[in-house]
Image (tube, grey):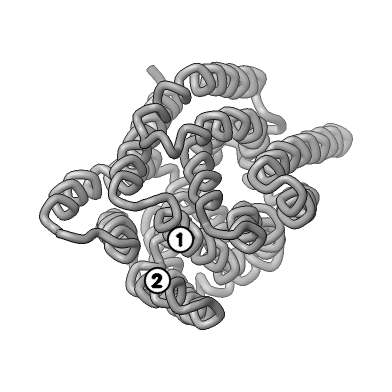
Amino acid sequence: MSKSKRQVLVLYAATFVGAILNFVASKINTDVLDTVSYGNVRYVMNIVQLLSWVVLFGWFMSGSRLLALSDDPKRSARIRGMLVCYLGIAAALLTAGTAVAGLLHGTELRMLFLCALPVCFYPLLTNYMNTTAQGDNHIFRLALARVLPVLCFIPVALLVYRRVDVVDSRTVLWLHWGICSAVLVAIVISTCPSFRNLKPLFADLRQENRDYGIHLYYGSLAMVATNYLSGVTLGIFDDNNANVGFFTLALSLAQPISYLPGIVGTTFFKRFVHEPCIPRRVMWLTLAITMLSCLGFILLIGPVVSLYDASYHVVARYAAWLAVGFSLHGVGDMINRYLGSHGQGRSIRDSSFACGAVKILGSFLLVWLWSVKGAILTAVLSSAVYTLTLYLNYRRFVNNQMVKS
């Protein structure tokens, strides 16, 4: 078996196992919290994750492309060191943003935001691993990052929740993100980043960010950051955060579907740099993974959600519809990886803007009209727009390359 096939298999397996472990983790957390308390936790997580995208400014994505272009292990280690420096700056900005967000809420949620300050950098660590491992082709380390954090959380949570008399929202937030953050920090350290002679690399990173990363950043604000917007507007328009919990739980169960086709693009990212178009077998592999994963998810999600408390039974129906949207989104992510490997940041940005526009409009208008159903419709429509516009941009890029050659 070739290296690329092994990497696809390993990352696919890790993503599948990670999805199962995240289901177990959510089951453990929902067992100790009522629907409103669980909704409060997810509401705070949504806000922090949205803010985490604001403080990135495209540096991680620019660094990922520099890593993909680098054939020198020492230079790659220095690039990782430079990105770790920025990770620290972004963490400080995110901590300040989380504190400000807390001050804008009522007493109960304000305390939860303030309690999140020591662990709020978890989304940044996740983003760092996803981007740098892709550029560095550290697929096995990325697979570890998708499994090990939640695998460590589950036994500790079971032990702590049994020993503590009262488990509240703060306990769940601290324990979940705290343990996952500690594990990801260890994985980041294992990449052996180098901090020697970084000054010349900052010039390369600034240039790459100007040409490529900043365009992806603007697109990510319009698309990825708005992933959390429906969860926020549900909390604003509804009487309490119960629906926030239902919707975000369905999101967390269905979202791994989008990762599976993207696995192919992540694995081939470094190779895509030298390809004039996406190889036909890669495209067919992506479509096959997508359809099989979506069908399997829809068939299994009902029995899976039945393991939760009866108050969560509506999550199965929500997750099944979201799986369709995430499947479309995953195909778009694979095309995104190809365009990204060729530095087509503007094309990706434009597709992200189109997707984000649908999400913003839907998160306010459709959520106001139809609550959770409006949030689900927004997710499906925005994913379809994202994939369609990316495919059109991909065809335009390939045709232009053929004309030039």
Q: Can residue 93 be seen here?
A: no
Q: Amino acid at mark 2?
A: Leu
Q: Secondary structure at mark 1?
A: helix
* Place of residue 118 in the rendered image (x, y in percent of width and height, measured from the top left): 33, 73
Q: Secondary structure at mark 2?
A: helix
Instruction: Note whether 318 is above or below 124 in the view shown.
Output: above
**What residue is drawn where x is 39% and y is 76%?**
111
Labelled pair 1, 2 in contact (Cβ < 8 Å):
yes
Residue that label 2 marks: 112
* Place of residue 132 in the rendered image (x, y in percent of width and height, measured from the top left): 46, 53
Residue that label 1 marks: 40
Left or right position of 115 against 156: right
**Which is more toward the observer, 372 or 70?**
372
Quadrant the C terminus occupies = top right
* Place of residue 399 in the rendered image (x, y in percent of width and height, measured from the top left): 85, 33
- Where, by quadrant of the figure, is residue 110 drawn? bottom left
Q: Residues within 10 Å of mark 2 (few under 14, many from 20)?
A: many
Q: Amino acid at mark 1?
A: Asn
